[in-house]
Image (cartoon, coloured by chain):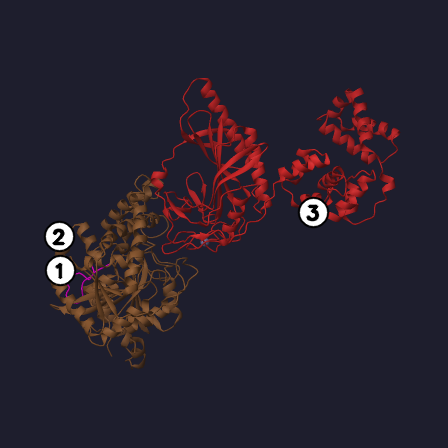
Amino acid sequence: MNSYEEFSKKDKPTDYFIKLSEELSKLNEELNAFNVISESSKINKFPISVKDNLCIKDMETTASSKILKSYIPPFDATVVSKIRGKNNFSFLGKTNMDEFGFGSFGVNSEKCPKNPFNTSYVSGGSSSGSAIATSILKYHISIAESTGGSISTPSAFCGVVGFTPTYGSVSRYGLIDYSNSLDKIGIMARNSNDIRFMYDIIKGKDSYDTTCVDVKCNNENNKTIILIDELIKGINPEIEKSFLELVDNFSKMGYKIKHKSLPFIEKAIASYYIIAMAEASTNLAKYTGFKYGFKNENISEKYNEFFTTSRSNFGKEAKRRLVLGTFVRSASVKDMYYSKALKTRTLLINELSKVLNEGFILSPVMPIKTPKFDEINKFSPLEVYKTDILTIPPNLCGFPHIAFPYKYLNGMPLGAQLITKHWNDYAIIDIVFEWENNFKYNFKYNLGSL
Amino acid sequence: MKIGLEVHVGLPTKTKLFCRCKAYATEPNTAICPICTGLPGAKPMLNKKALELSVDISNALNCTIEKETSFVRKVYFYPDLPKSFQITQKDMPVGHSGTLKINNKVIGIRRIQLEEDPAKILREDNYTLIDYNRSGQPLVEIVTEPDITSEDELRVFMNELKSILYYLGVDVDQDIKADLNISLSDSRVEIKNVTGLKNLIDAAKYEIQRQEKLIKEKQKISQETRSYSEAKLSTISSREKESDEEYGFIFEPDLTTYSLQSIKPKEPVYVSEIAKEYSKKYHVNESQLLEIISFDKTSLKIIQSFAGKYEMKSILNAILSFKRYGKSELKEKFIEKAIKLIEKGSYLDGEVISALEKGKEININNNVVNTDEIDSEIRSIINKNKQLLEDYKTNKKAMNSVIGMVLKKFKTNPRIISERLEYILSNEFKV
Ligand SMILES: [Zn+2]
């Protein structure tokens, strides 16, 4: 049974939603999970939250950026209208994130999101708020988005299940673009049943997104887990020890464990950041303060000065990616960076497809333990980018993947990630379901329990 | 002298290139949506009809059409560009390496690409208005090699191109826009955004004169971008910052690659070839024939269906008479009746044409006259008495005596004589 069915069957006190809304608003002051919480009068059905880079008609949508402050979209993203069309759900609000999705830890947002298990730890990013909301609400599903690991990472840090489907299976219409060829809308929930339930609602062809297609999702499982040497070798020893226990558990569940070496996989990080930044720098070009968002009051400025003033409101990481992205696509260096990165992606898709035909790739989500806020400050940008080594390969190649909690270490959850071939999405959801029969997830908060 | 062109042609589609808004709406900012105003989260979707038309054009201009085509983002900041990038084509255009024959020469076509039009800027004294109706309207850009070597060739090329487009259903009379590249020396001068054929020819003329003068004075011609001022009849240097380096083209990731193999192009019509062939075969004036058929499908169809059946001269005469006096569109059955009248020696005036259009029977016996004889009589009278021309300039009635004299010789309808007289005065004596 999924949470929605369970929720529907239970009797609710008359003030249930008002109480839920109050409790959530109070806790949100501490955790910063939501950028916007809907008025309590508008919440009367199963609550869904949506990452703040997805447009909801008449609800402020800023992708956590100052430059989009007070922007209210006049249209719903396709996923939002699909959920709305079911008439069974209420939109609880918009969840906090790294500005435009630029980040792995959630710290690139003005109101810093905090880990619900312990507020001195980061929540992970960029879909920080979606993971926190899922971790604190008993009945809840969140619509998140991943470009390079933005679903897996916060899911792992906040102890929820995070599913990133095959690129092209969910319409991106109404998603504020980070990197169009990499952005994927996915789902966070407290169990695999909820993931499957919501995936069936939001997936499918949309004439408003050319890259979104109808392909029947498969469920092929040859009971083989593959460990890629290059992905395991650099991880934190404590994480490695716990992860090997997980591998043992899969072995006990009847899975054959295979080891493989794929040195080429290390090229994924450079290829990913080049493509992502190149595309991002074109996507951010439209924010000139001209029609929406940040209002530059000095309208007598010449156009160049006008948009330059407006664009000074981008955050630091956004500026970094704009500069790097603009550089890598300049004509004189394009072949060295952008074109090469595209070729690398194609090669990696071919290489990894071969491996994934033999079984599922399993790895931790992050090579490090959940960092504390004061540890993050010591990382250089390059060190931060490198922590994405485990989540970038499936994201760069558009392979479906799912993160799930597998252990609690000193009170903090650890997450692992399963990757499968294109359009075999149901298989990994089912494996997590299988895992959930042996392992019970813990949550610190259960707001709205009945 | 080397002249190259980048011609921008608006495609006659019902909707815009990447959204479902009505194309060519007139009331400002009424045909707009999140896609063509570049709202965050909106994505483009390609109008297949526009793609088909661009394939028709590429095929008509003998281009190589590859298996697939794709789009790129061209990034620059300007108030008319809502996304701050234009969706256009670069490495995989719809067509490339084509040709267009003019007179006895071949002009190379470098590439043909499909792209979106930016919004329209209306500059007022102390403010600027933007009309997003134009944003996202479909454009085809036709880029030629610098093979045009004279103003005259430029005119012929543009007429030929416009006629080909017209026969493909792309009528571009008013808003044909082009960038001109003109080099008389090693320096290439680009004149951006010239609207309309007349301005294009004028801009070329003034730029050629300017460069000739600089060469004569042994001054250096600088490589630059200029704009044409219709009011000043000259080209003016304009600062252009962007180059390919800064545009930073990347593949448009919200679109896919599109197959061109499944598109069957429309058969092109080359009127200059038809005019050449018919003028040789039927002994009629080539340029007159070309003028009749360049932008007139109906006339071409009539000529093709009657060729061989009637004298070509009579067919053209009938068409021209209808074009001069006719009130409705050309109709094959009326033209055929008119041809028969002409072939029996009848003269077609306004009254006859009007009767034909109303389906009235014409009693041709009253109307048989040889206008050639009337014409030569008129000419000889005027030539013998040049004072008549001077008088005519101040007094239109001065020519009435001529009508009387001709009428005495040919007992025919005075209206015909008066019409021939008027025609000769304006066309031959230029009064
Ligand atoms: Zn539109």
Which of the numbered marks, if any, corresponds to residue A249? none
Query: Does the residue at mark 3 contact the one at mark 1 (Cβ under 8 Å)?
Result: no
Say few, some or many: other residues with alpha carbon within 10 Å of mark 2 (under 14 / 14 to 19 / 20 or more).
Answer: few
Colour chosen for chain B: red
Is residue A18 or residue A439 the one in the foreground? A439
Residue at which label 3 appears: B329
Is residue B358 or residue B66 the one in the foreground? B66
Which of the numbered marks, if any, corresponds to residue A378? 2
Give, as a single range, the part of the protein colored magenta: A112-125
Q: Is residue A20 left or right of residue B333?
A: left
Q: Is residue A243 left or right of residue B351?
A: left
Kindly report the distance in space between the C-alpha atoms of the residues bearing marks 3 and 1.
84 Å
Q: Is residue B274 above or below residue A183?
A: above
Chain at numbered mark 2: A
Residue B210 drawn at (x, y percent):
47, 24
Chain at numbered mark 3: B
Q: Nearer the viewer, mark 2 or mark 1?
A: 1
Kindly report the distance in space between the C-alpha atoms of the residues bearing marks 2 and 3.
81 Å
Chain with brown colouring:
A
Q: Quadrant of residue B103?
A: top right
Residue at which label 1 appears: A236
Quadrant of ligand 1 in image: bottom left
Instruction: Point out the image quarter for the C terminus of chain B.
Output: top right
Q: Amino acid at mark 1?
A: Asn
- The reply to whether the magenta stretch includes residue A385 is no
Kindly report the distance in space between the C-alpha atoms of the residues bearing marks 2 and 1.
17 Å
Residue B235 drawn at (x, y percent):
47, 29
- Say whether mark 1 and mark 3 are on the same chain: no
Is the CB–ligand 1 distance for label 3 below 8 Å?
A: no
Q: Is residue A257 left or right of residue B32?
A: left
Residue A100 drawn at (x, y percent):
28, 55
